[in-house]
Structures are given as structure tokens and as C-alpha cells.
Image (spheres, rainbow, N blue to C red):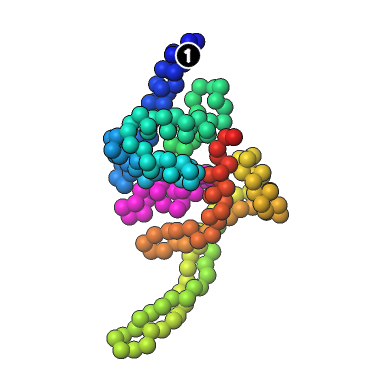
């Protein structure tokens, strides 16, 4: 195939890759599908996949062409089999974003932008789900003029557990290198009346981002 034809084909693929991203971005709280809004791509769920240097570049995009080129390279680096049509990594990402939006919306915040949404996108659904409870200090101001009181209150923990052997090979290897005795990783989320947030296990999400990029 002539180089000019190949170049045109790659550009078409990049444009098509950008369409679902911008479609997701049109939802509340994410990027607008305009050249001026291209720098805001990092505000949507795709941010969870980005390396720090990619965030740096994405925040400085200024045109639709720059955004298309960035997206093309972004997904190519994560395509597990570039010689095959489609990109199973991107397909899984969009499926998990949709699931997170349905399951984990927190008030006005879309589910894929919450901590549990991030975990679902990066690690998939947990094979094991546990609940625990512990007491934590709580400060109570009391009545005007009185001394504040420090009491304790129950904190509900939702724990997502993943056997290391069931994780993607690159992630399994990274954990084996950093934590050779670990057989199961766990993410602990504090369940509050108004929100649920990650309190332990951040490093495993960072490992997932780092190992999701093809060398």
C-alpha cells in the first residue's frame, strides 16, 4: 500500500477512535468536543489511563488535529495486538466506563469519575467483595462555649480483592517485582453517607496504569 494511502488510513482510524472519546466527553463534567476544549480531555475517565507525561501533553492540546494525533498514539500504545483490527483494550475501557457510570454515580458526579469507577476501569470487577467496619476518631464541636469532644464513630469499609495470578500478566509481574510475597491485592473504600472514596490500595491502580502501556 502506498505511503500516502497508509497515512490516510491511519488518520481515518484516529478520527474514528476520537468519536467515542468525544461522545463520552459530551456528558456533564467532561471535555467539550471543540478544538478549544481539546486540552480538557484529561477531565474525563480517560484520565485514569494516562501516564503523567501524557497528562502534561494532553492539557496543552490546542486543536482538533492535535487531539486526533494524540488519541491515535494513545490507543496504539495500549493496543495488545496492533496487527489485528480493532483494539480490545479500548473496547474494554469503554465497556467499563459505561458500567461504572451505571453503578457508581455519586450525587452529581458520574460513576466513572469516582474512586470505585476508576478502580473498575483499571482492574475490572473484583472477584471478591468484602465488607468490614472499624471505629475512627470523630471531632464534635459541641455547644457554643463548650469544649469540643473527640469521640469515635463506625466507618464501613468496602474491600475489593483480586488474586494476583488472575490479573493481567504485566501487572502480575510488576507486583511480583515490588511485593514478591503478595498473593492478593485489596482496595479499601470508605463508605460514607455522601460519598465513597479509596483509602488504601492506590499503588495498585498506579501499577495498572504503568503496565497498561505497551513498550
For the residue pair 144 and 31, the one nearer the viewer reads as 31
For the residue pair 53 and 194, the one nearer the viewer reads as 53
Q: Which residue is mark 1?
A: 3
Residue 142, percent from left and from top:
34, 83
- Was residue 76 drawn as part of the magenta stretch in this picture? no
Q: Residue at x 38, y 26 (%)?
A: 15
Q: Is residue 30 visible?
A: yes
Q: Residue at x 41, y 46 (%)?
A: 112
Q: Residue furthest right?
A: 181
Q: Residue at x 38, y 30 (%)?
A: 68
| Picture layout, residue 71 above or below residue 111 | above
Q: Residue at x 44, y 13 (%)?
A: 5
| Picture layout, residue 17 above or below residue 37 | above
Residue 189, percent from left and from top:
49, 59
Magenta segment boundaries in residue numbering = 105-126
Snapshot quadrant of residue 140 = bottom left
Snapshot quadrant of residue 211 = top right
Residue 39, percent from left and from top:
35, 41
| Picture layout, residue 107 above or below residue 16 | below
Amino acid at each position: 500500500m502506498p505511503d500516502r494511502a497508509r497515512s490516510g488510513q491511519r488518520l481515518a482510524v484516529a478520527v474514528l477512535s476520537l468519536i467515542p472519546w468525544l461522545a463520552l466527553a459530551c456528558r456533564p463534567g467532561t471535555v467539550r468536543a471543540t478544538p478549544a476544549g481539546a486540552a480538557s480531555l484529561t477531565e474525563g475517565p480517560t484520565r485514569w489511563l494516562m501516564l503523567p507525561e501524557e497528562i502534561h501533553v494532553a492539557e496543552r492540546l490546542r486543536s482538533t488535529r492535535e487531539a486526533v494525533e494524540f488519541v491515535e498514539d494513545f490507543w496504539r500504545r495500549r493496543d495488545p495486538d496492533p496487527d489485528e483490527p480493532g483494539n480490545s483494550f479500548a473496547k474494554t475501557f469503554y465497556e467499563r466506563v459505561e458500567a461504572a457510570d451505571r453503578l457508581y454515580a455519586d450525587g452529581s458526579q458520574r460513576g466513572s469519575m469516582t474512586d470505585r469507577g476508576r478502580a473498575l476501569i483499571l482492574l475490572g470487577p473484583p472477584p471478591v467483595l468484602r465488607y468490614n467496619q472499624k471505629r475512627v476518631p470523630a471531632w464534635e464541636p459541641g455547644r457554643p462555649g463548650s469544649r469540643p469532644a473527640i469521640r469515635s464513630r463506625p466507618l464501613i469499609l468496602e474491600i475489593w480483592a483480586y488474586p494476583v495470578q488472575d490479573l493481567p500478566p504485566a501487572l502480575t509481574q510488576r507486583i511480583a517485582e515490588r511485593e514478591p510475597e503478595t498473593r492478593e491485592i485489596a482496595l479499601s473504600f470508605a463508605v460514607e453517607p455522601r460519598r465513597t472514596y479509596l483509602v488504601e490500595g492506590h499503588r495498585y491502580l498506579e501499577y495498572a496504569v504503568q503496565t497498561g502501556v505497551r513498550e
